Image: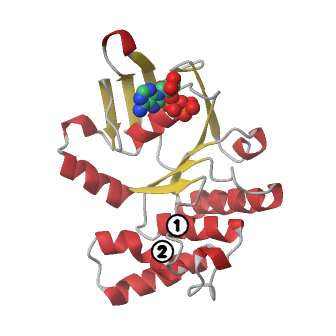
Amino acid sequence: MTATPLIRLDKVTKQYGRGQAAMLALKGIDLDIQAGEFVTVMGPSGSGKSTCMNILGCLDTPTSGIFYFQGVDVGKLSADQRTLLRRHYLGFVFQGFNLLNRTSALENVELPLVYRSIPAVQRHRRAHSALAAVGLSGWETHTPSELSGGQQQRVAIARALVTDPKVILADEPTGNLDSARSREIMELLTDLNRERGITIIMVTHESEMAAYANRRIHFVDGLIEGG
Ligand code: ADP
């Protein structure tokens, strides 16, 4: 017997627009991701990667097919339950870091805990510990403009980590970084995957970065190649 996959997409399609303007961005995707995997998602622009990541991130819903998270049919959850799933189980890392610019590193990292109504003392403690985990102890009071690109991405990873997610969804996390900084970020993600067992799903265009993962999936024209 195999364990229930953490994530299962079963014949998932996504259509944008209607009638003549309709376009099928996902054409029936089947995908299983087990807890603890580090998966990279590759494929040309327009092949459906972001559409798929938005579904996995509970930011969008399939037109047909089923997205299961820990065996639960996400389509059967209410919008509020999906928001809770996102806040409790998922962490997000973006190419452009998406930090609040006039806000300290510590406050940026605390933000997801504010949404979860965690008391201030506990928020500070957890944010300090998340910043330490990404090698940024001592940088708590700095704002993003006082940090390098690599450090800003570390703050963003700390913000994703602070809720203790099961999954980190990363959309080209090294896209704005030079190659040395990119490798440091990939090593950090690899450590979080190995040491904390966090499942990582990362979109990248760069095969050097994809090589850090255990598995690569390739999107072509709304389908997973070989899938
Ligand atoms: P990728 O991330 O691989 O570049 P996307 O998932 O962004 O691909 O896009 C897949 C297809 O869906 C593209 O043809 C794109 O133009 C189209 N698409 C994406 N988002 C929308 C949208 N909100 N409305 C209409 N079409 C969209």
Where, by quadrant of the figure, is residue 105 drawn?
A: bottom right
Q: Which of marks 2 and 1 is nearer the N terminus?
A: 1
Work out which residue is located at the far top of the displayed protein and give it.
20
Marks 2/1: CA–CA distance: 7 Å
Image side of residue 169 versus residue 139, left or right: left
Which residue is rendered at x = 70% and y = 56% of the image?
Answer: 186
Work out whether 148 lies above or below 104: above
Element assignment for label 2: helix
Q: How many labels does the image show?
A: 2
Q: In this view, does 27 lie above or below 122?
A: above
Q: On the image, numbered disc 2 is attached to which residue?
A: 108
Q: Where the C terminus falls, by quadrant?
A: top right
Residue 193's disc number: none
Residue at 52% across, 77% down: 102
Residue 206 drawn at (x, y percent): 74, 40
Where is residue 69, by image quadrant? top left
Q: Dividing the picture into quarters, in which one does residue 195 lie?
A: bottom right
Q: Which amino acid type is marked by label 1?
A: Leu
Residue 135 is at least partly visible in this image: no
Q: Is residue 54 above or below residue 219?
A: below
Q: What residue type is labelled 2?
A: Asn
**In front here: 206 or 100?**
100
Other residues around mark 2 within 10 Å, as few (<14) / some (14–19) / many (≥20) = many
Most foreground residue, 147 or 179: 147
In front here: 80 or 126?
A: 80
Outermost residue toward the right in this view:
180
Q: Which mark is residue 99?
A: 1
Q: Residue at x 70, y 54 (%)?
A: 176
Closest to the observer, 17 or 26: 17
Residue 76, x across and y down, in percent:
19, 37
Establish whether ligand 1 lies closer than 8 Å to the Cβ of label 2.
no
Whether residues under marks 2 and 1 lie with C-beta atoms below 8 angstroms apart, the answer is: yes
